[in-house]
Image (tube, rainbow, N blue to C red):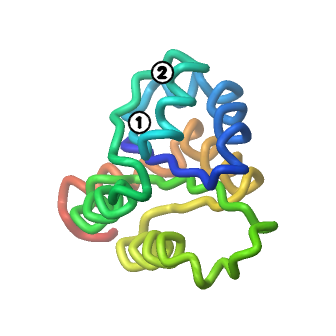
Amino acid sequence: MNIAFMAHDKKKELMVQFCAAYKSVLAKHTLMATSATGRLVADATGLPITLFLSRAQGGHQQLGARIAYNEIDMVLFFTDPNSTMDPWQDQTLVEILHLCDAHNVPCATNLATAEMLILGLDRGDLDWRDISRSTGRLI
């Protein structure tokens, strides 16, 4: 499975902790992330991570394109609900959520949902994504 990570600045440390806690599960998959988040996770865990550009330089657009081409199987985008910005004004968040919904890609925006997805991934609950990716169709 191809798993992509993004995190708002105040949630990057939580993403690092999450990836460290689930390192054994994540190590079995292909990991991708926007630049700052990916570097932090890779440095802390030793996991190999393909880095996109930073969010400001268009890393979210690179991620979005891969979602649209069915090259991403799961997105973990830890958002900061305490940000002064209205979450629906965060165009990056809205675009990524829209693409995940449009292409049936599981997406977590918080720790609780991310844990459910990772545990399901480890159990094989998301194996349908392999079939979907190989046929280009949803099951």
Front one among 59 and 15: 59
Residue 74 position, x and y percent, is: 46, 53
Front one among 43 and 20: 43
Residue 65 position, x and y percent, is: 26, 63
CB contact under 8 Å: marks 1 and 2: yes
Residue 138 position, x and y percent, is: 31, 70
In the displayed structure image, the side of residue 33 where residue 82 appears, left or right? right
In the image, residue 89 above or below residue 109: below
Residue of label 2: 47
Question: What amino acid is found at the position of numbered circle 1 in the picture?
Answer: Leu
**Secondary structure of the residue carrying numbered label 1:** strand
Question: What's the CA distance linking mark 1 and mark 2?
Answer: 8 Å
Residue at 43% over, 76% down: 95
Question: What amino acid is found at the position of numbered circle 2 in the picture?
Answer: Leu
In the displayed structure image, the side of residue 16 where residue 42 appears, left or right? left
Nearer the N terminus, badge 1 or badge 2?
A: 1
Residue 126 position, x and y percent, is: 48, 51
Report which quarter residue 132 is drawn in.
Answer: bottom left
Residue at 48% over, 70% down: 92
**Secondary structure of the residue carrying numbered label 2:** loop
- Farthest residue to the left: give it: 135
Residue of label 1: 31
